[in-house]
């Protein structure tokens, strides 16, 4: 089946001039061209559309019903075409378009809310598409081009470092989340204070760095934790703590997640630091990301 011919923008512009002037000579003068090629262009447009656009007499021309219907549509199409270049320039400049951003749940309790608020106020032309996802899922989404950037826990695996850029955004200590039924010192707790309590943590598959940091911290103090439960969402971990199923070592920002039955405690031992950063494809940097990064960095201070 043959593809239908479509009108050219040049033809629509010429049609509009003739329709507004209702005179081929004046329209040709307005378009800075001679009359014969203008008449031929309008005839070609009529042939393309399969309808007559003008009623022609020896003295005057008038629009047909089809011509009257085409005129506002032609004006709209031309206006959109003329606006295309400025719109694309805004997208390239990072002031319009879409930013597809994934984030781990930890970011939702620290840097993400205030970053989004400030960024949206500064760049209202950017549509932000958010995806909550674990670090391992975000790395897959970056590889597949499903997101522009991701807030995650490093490291980026060695085999992906040639493809993915990474920048540290926030570093914070671990704290203890414990059931309020557990009797612990108010001024801070040592790891020995919670050594006998069941531990709740992320599975290694989705957050290897955080998982290993916590277990290494126990081992460095000669302790072997009893892992009672694993969960892939921070709010689930805190919910399990509230249910009295054990304690959790969580990034400090999680203390912003207030849940009845949970008390957060500072670690008296030299608490391990955990890092959150942003990753993006080296070969597919979203224009909007260049403006988002400074807001993200300032929100981490």
Image: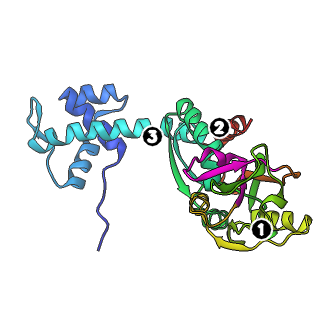
Task: Check residue 20 for magenta coloring.
Answer: no
Which x, y percent locates residue 43?
22, 47
Which x, y percent locates residue 180?
63, 53
Q: Kindly report which numbered mark, 1 or 3, lies closer to the viewer in this rendering.
A: 1
Give the Cα separation between the discs numbered 1 and 3. Answer: 65 Å
Give the Cα separation between the discs numbered 1 and 2. Answer: 48 Å
Give the Cα separation between the discs numbered 3 and 2. Answer: 22 Å
Numbered mark located on residue 291 in the image: 2
Taking depth in this image into account, of 200 and 58 the one nearest to the observer is 200
Image position of 149 (left or right of 98) = right
Badge 3 marks a residue whose secondary structure is helix
Is the residue marked by circle 3 packed among few (<14), some (14-19), or many (20+) residues within 10 Å?
few
Taking depth in this image into account, of 152 and 158 the one nearest to the observer is 152
Extent of the magenta region:
248-267
Q: Which residue is mark 3?
A: 84
Taking depth in this image into account, of 156 and 111 the one nearest to the observer is 111
Question: Quadrant location of residue 191?
Answer: bottom right
Query: In this rendering, does residue 68 appear at all?
Result: yes
Q: Which residue is mark 1?
A: 196
**In terms of sequence position, does the residue under pointer 1 or pointer 3 come before the other?**
3
**In terms of sequence position, does the residue under pointer 3 or pointer 2 come before the other?**
3
Image position of 5 (left or right of 61) = right
């Amino acid at each position: 089946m043959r593809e239908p011919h479509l009108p050219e923008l040049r033809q629509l512009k010429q049609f509009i001039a003739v329709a507004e002037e209702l005179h081929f000579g004046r329209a040709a003068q307005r378009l800075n061209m001679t009359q014969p090629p203008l008449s031929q262009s309008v005839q070609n447009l009529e042939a393309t559309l399969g309808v007559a656009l003008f009623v022609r007499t020896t003295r005057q021309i008038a629009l047909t019903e089809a011509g009257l219907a085409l005129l506002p549509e032609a004006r709209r199409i031309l206006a959109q075409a003329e606006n295309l270049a400025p719109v694309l320039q805004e997208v390239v400049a990072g002031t319009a378009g879409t930013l597809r951003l994934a984030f781990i749940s930890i970011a939702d309790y620290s840097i993400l809310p205030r970053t989004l608020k400030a960024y949206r106020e500064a760049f209202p032309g950017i549509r932000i598409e958010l995806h909550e996802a674990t670090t391992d899922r975000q790395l897959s989404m970056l590889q597949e081009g499903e997101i522009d950037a991701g807030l995650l826990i490093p490291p980026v695996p060695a085999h992906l470092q040639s493809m993915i850029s990474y920048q540290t955004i926030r570093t914070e200590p671990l704290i203890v989340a414990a059931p309020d039924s557990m009797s612990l010192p108010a001024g801070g707790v040592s790891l020995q204070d919670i050594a006998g309590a069941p531990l709740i943590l992320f599975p290694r598959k989705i957050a290897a760095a955080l998982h290993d940091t916590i277990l290494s911290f126990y081992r460095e103090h000669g302790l072997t934790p009893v892992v009672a439960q694993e969960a892939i969402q921070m709010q689930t971990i805190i919910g399990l703590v509230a249910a009295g199923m054990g304690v959790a070592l969580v990034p400090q920002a999680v203390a912003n997640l207030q849940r009845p039955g949970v008390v957060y405690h500072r670690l008296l031992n030299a608490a391990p630091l955990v890092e959150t950063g942003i990753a993006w494809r080296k070969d597919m940097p979203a224009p909007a990301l260049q403006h988002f990064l400074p807001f993200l960095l300032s929100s981490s201070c």
